[in-house]
Image (spheres, rainbow, N blue to C red):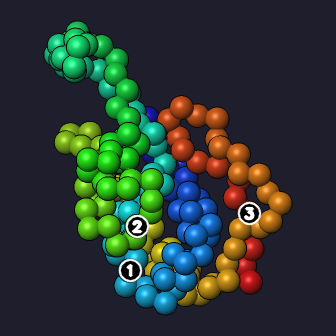
Amino acid sequence: MLAGHETTAALLGNTLYTALSQREIWAALGAHPELAGTAVDEFIRHDGPAFGLYRRTTRAIALGDVTMPQGATVFIAYFAGNTDPAQFPDPERLDILRHNAASHVTFGHGIHYCIGAPLARLELRVVLEELPQAYPHLRLAADQSFTPVASFLLRAYESLVIVLD
């Protein structure tokens, strides 16, 4: 089970990496902190901390040509749903004004919906409202490697060095 500490740290790190790599987004958030509200769900969709989670089927189910029996272990790939071009046009592009970003599946769905989702959104919103204004020249340190965490479930970097200017 993934819980708030690791996933929140990963989400914040992923968000900062993307926002600081795309300076126009960092500048827009600094100049217009009201954009943080719409940007939160787009960063969660685009840079979510979990690739997905395992579940067990509660009954036999057919998907295309494959039938999975009751009790089968399946991997629900949140990231795949968040990059579905039928749902999100140009899904690989971060668009902090995306009108339907809140329809992402990063936090799951139904009875498995993440209980910490409101807190994660709040924490990310505070970061996106405050940091770009307080530190408009915040940047990724040069000469660092962006090594992904060795995990099939968690999408994060081993470390992220940021310079406050």
Q: Nearer the viewer, residue 110 or 1?
A: 110
Q: Percent x, y for residue 34?
A: 37, 85
Closer to the N terminus: mark 2 or mark 3? 2
Tell me which corner region of the image, top left, top right, bottom left or bottom right, holds residue 150: top right
Q: Tell me if mark 1 has few (under 14), some (14-19) or many (20+) residues whose alpha carbon lies within 10 angstroms of its own.
A: some
Count neighbours of disc 2 (C-alpha within 10 A) and say few if under 14, some if 14 to 19, many if 20 or more.
some
Say left or right for 61 vs 12.
Answer: left
Q: Earlier in the sequence, mark 1 or mark 2?
A: 1
| Disc 3 element | loop
Horizontal side, residue 20 vs residue 93: left or right? right
**Disc 2: which residue:** 95
Q: Position of residue 143 (x, y in %)?
A: 83, 60
Density class for disc 3 (Cα within 10 Å; few <14, some 14-19, many ≥20) is some
Task: Give the residue type that dot 3 points to.
Answer: Val
Q: Quadrant of residue 21?
A: bottom right
Residue positioned 64% across, 41% down in the render: 149
Provide the secondary structure element on which disc 1 rests. Answer: helix
Residue picked out by circle 1:
35
Residue 41 image position (x, y, % from top left) = 35, 63
* Relative vertical location of residue 15 with respect to residue 165 in this rendering, above or below: above
Label 1 is placed on what type of residue?
Leu
Q: In the rendering, which numbered label is found on residue 161?
A: 3
Q: Residue at coordinates 58% horizontally, 34% vertically from top-left?
A: 151
